[in-house]
Image (spheres, rainbow, N blue to C red):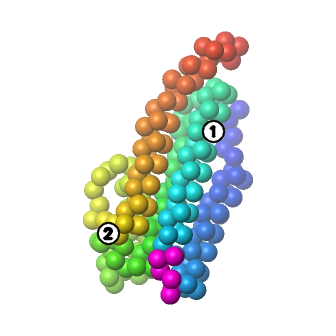
Amino acid sequence: MFRIPVLRNVIEYSTIVLLWGTGLLAVQWFRDYPLTLQITILWICFAKAVFFGRENLNQLYEAARSNLSHHHFLLLMAINMSQMILSFAFDFHLLHLIDQNSFTGIVETASFWEALFDFFYLSTLNFSFFGYSEILPQTVIAKCANLTEIVLAFITVIFLLSDFVSLKDSLRSRHPSQK
């Protein structure tokens, strides 16, 4: 029987929001050290990309091994993808708060929440491979964070989602008892 790991996902969403909240405090407390803050955010970005990549891969193998239906697997991946989108949107937002020149296309008079929405929009476009946004990274650190999300999205969509059916068939042919 398929069950979404609700508690685990609540913890993961909460951790993403908590990291962002901690980042907001760090931006206020350490505003005199913008480069240190930006590099720290970039490293956290990389660490989260590794975490999400491993989690997606583990879920792919577990779903294939347990003969999970394709639509249930897609639901799990949609949850993971929403976590990744939210996480990177928060990273972009923090980079923007540290250096207003990190991204172009954000209206200078945008409120805190409008700017946050703009970064959620950018992150969603990055993850969907839409390829167009009026919001563009301008600094090397912002470009690296943006590129990290695009690579993670590529790996998630191209390798993981497209390989689910073939991996499932491969595992079934190796273990006929799972048919």
The answer to which quarter of the image holds residue 97 is bottom left
Instruction: Tell me what residue is drawn at x 31 percent, y 65 percent.
Output: 136
Q: Kindly tell me whether residue 91 is visible in this rendering.
A: yes
Q: Taking 100 as reference, is 64 left or right?
A: right
The quarter of the rendered structure image containing the N terminus is top right
Q: Kindly tell me whether residue 90 is visible in this rendering.
A: no
Which of 63 and 137 lies nearest the eye of the viewer? 137
Which of 73 and 139 lies nearest the eye of the viewer? 139
The quarter of the rendered structure image containing the C terminus is top right
Q: Earlier in the sequence, mark 2 or mark 1?
A: 1
Task: From the image, state whether disc 2 or disc 1 is nearer to you.
Answer: 2
Taking the magenta stretch, the answer to whether it contains residue 34 is yes
| Residue 39: % across, % down | 50, 70
Which of 67 and 21 lies nearest the eye of the viewer? 21
Q: Circle 2 is placed at which residue position?
A: 138
| Residue 139: % across, % down | 35, 70
Q: Residues within 10 Å of mark 2 (few under 14, many from 20)?
A: few
Q: Circle 1 is placed at which residue position?
A: 58
Which of 6 and 102 lies nearest the eye of the viewer? 102
In the rendered image of this protein, does residue 25 appear above or below residue 43? below
Q: Taking 62 as reference, is 40 left or right?
A: left
| Residue 177: % across, % down | 71, 13
Q: CA distance from mark 2 to mark 1?
A: 34 Å
| Residue 88: % across, % down | 48, 61
SS category of the residue bearing label 1: helix
Taking the magenta stretch, the answer to whether it contains residue 80 is no
Stretch of the chain drawn in magenta: 31-36
